[in-house]
Image (cartoon, helix red, strand yellow):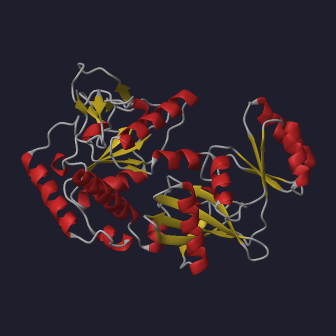
């Protein structure tokens, strides 16, 4: 019989050294003395000590390097881990061992390809270097998902399963796995946003070219065709010509892809990107399109700081809550009648343009947020709390 009231995230980890353990105990004491009702801004100002953060990604991009820099400045350790090299094992410990698979949760996700930021080369087309004797993800105090590399359906599902397993063991994952699943799927995210009472563009999602062409006519013959999965404006095309619509829909149908057809919203050539973190808008920018109709910075748009109105801020927070994100990039588009549309919620938001434009050190705030959550998890799941952890018997 297994009595598993709550699984202790450190149960299967190496025992931390004495100094680190003492630092964590002092941090727990400090948190326990603090008022539990502190607001998000005050929470963000607290920085616990000696936390190790895994940065799950597909390589050593700018955001990874910025998070490593921020962690170092705050006295933590952030280590990039290549999503493509993560492996796991289930029920491999001797029966009766604490830390063996509990209720189907993997004993430990292992990352033999943990990346060395000092020796990494290009990602595309190259296998990332391996570090000998890779470490378990259970050794980390928290996980930040920075990118989800391209892969087959099975690979992506497996990676998400690992994130769910880590979260089930009490390890903070930013963003939560379910929020990542919702936001990566444009249709599912749109359903959540519309159900929350937020204004979204008229959209038809279908599987045949005939249905998509009917939607093209119904939506006024001015539509944006988007990939169901994707970001940064990649793969989107605005279609206004019936002949181009026919060619586009037929080509997509032949690839057995879902057709996502959305009414084009006339706009003044700019939109707003709000960066939401822990229930507050951390920063916001106005993104003005360049030579393209798309307002994504990755597609040539420029970013300038902006102070949101109360209405705009409330929309951004409601959108983030609707899809379950802790950190989110929320895109707001002004419609022709002055109404605001929620176009997208990005669960892996970038800040390479937003940070310099607003002067906000987003990486610092991200590390602070996840480390505070990690320390609270450490305190609440500590054996000293009296809870029985993974007891076999």
Q: Position of residue 134 (x, y in %)?
A: 27, 30
The residue lying toward the viewer, choosing from 102 and 288, is 102
- Apparent side of residue 30 relative to residue 367 in the rendered image (left or right): left
Residue 213 is drawn in which quadrant? top right
Q: Residue at x 89, y 58 (%)?
A: 220
Q: Please, is residue 256 above or below residue 285 in the view? A: above
Quadrant occupied by the C terminus: top left
Q: Position of residue 43 (x, y in %)?
A: 32, 68
Quadrant occupied by the N terminus: top left
Q: Position of residue 91 (x, y in %)?
A: 32, 22
| Extreme residue in the left direction | 18
Q: Position of residue 283 (x, y in %)?
A: 48, 71
Q: Residue at x 17, y 60 (%)?
A: 27
Q: Is residue 191 visible?
A: yes
Q: Is residue 130 visible?
A: no
Residue 11 is drawn in which quadrant? top left
- Apparent side of residue 388 relative to residue 68 in the rendered image (left or right): left
**Numbered marks: total:** 0
Q: Please, is residue 325 above or below residue 168 in the view? A: below
- Apparent side of residue 216 relative to residue 300 in the rendered image (left or right): right
Q: Residue at x 54, y 32 (%)?
A: 151
Q: Please, is residue 1 above or below residue 368 in the view? A: above
Q: Please, is residue 54 above or below residue 350 in the view? A: above
The residue lying toward the viewer, choosing from 110 and 104, is 104
């Amino acid at each position: 019989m297994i009595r598993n009231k709550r699984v202790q995230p450190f149960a299967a980890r190496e025992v931390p050294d004495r100094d680190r353990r003492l630092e964590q105990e002092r941090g727990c004491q400090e948190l326990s003395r603090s008022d539990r009702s502190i607001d998000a801004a005050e929470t963000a100002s607290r920085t616990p000590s000696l936390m190790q953060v895994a940065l799950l990604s597909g390589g050593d991009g700018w955001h990874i390097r910025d998070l490593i820099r921020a962690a170092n400045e705050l006295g933590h350790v952030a280590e990039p881990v290549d999503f493509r090299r993560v492996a796991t094992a289930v029920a491999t410990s001797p029966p009766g061992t604490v830390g063996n698979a509990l209720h189907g949760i993997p004993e430990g996700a292992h990352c033999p390809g943990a990346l060395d930021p000092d020796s990494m080369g290009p990602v595309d087309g190259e296998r990332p270097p391996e570090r000998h004797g890779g470490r378990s993800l259970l050794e980390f105090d928290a996980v930040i998902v920075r990118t989800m590399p391209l892969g087959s359906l099975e690979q992506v599902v497996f990676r998400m399963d690992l994130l769910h397993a880590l979260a089930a063991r009490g390890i903070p994952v930013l963003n939560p796995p379910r929020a990542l699943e919702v936001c990566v799927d444009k249709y599912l995210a749109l359903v959540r946003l519309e159900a929350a009472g937020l204004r979204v563009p008229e959209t038809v999602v279908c599987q045949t070219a005939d249905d998509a062409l009917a939607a093209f006519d119904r939506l006024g013959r001015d539509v944006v065709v988007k990939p169901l999965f994707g970001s940064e404006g990649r793969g989107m095309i605005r279609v206004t010509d019936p002949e181009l619509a026919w060619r586009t829909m037929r080509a997509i149908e032949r690839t057995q892809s879902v057709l996502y057809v959305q009414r084009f919203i006339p706009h003044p050539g700019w939109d707003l990107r709000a960066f939401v973190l822990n229930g507050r808008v951390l920063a916001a920018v106005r993104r003005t399109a360049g030579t393209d109709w798309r307002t994504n910075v990755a597609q040539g748009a420029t970013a300038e700081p902006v102070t949101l109105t109360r209405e705009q801020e409330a929309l951004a927070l409601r959108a983030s809550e609707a899809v379950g994100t802790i950190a989110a990039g929320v895109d707001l588009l002004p419609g022709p009648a002055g109404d605001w549309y929620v176009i997208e919620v990005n669960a892996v938001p970038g800040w390479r343009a937003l940070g310099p434009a607003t002067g906000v050190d987003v990486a610092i705030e991200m590390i602070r947020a996840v480390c505070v959550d990690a320390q609270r998890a450490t305190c609440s799941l500590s054996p000293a709390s009296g809870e029985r952890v993974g007891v076999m018997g």
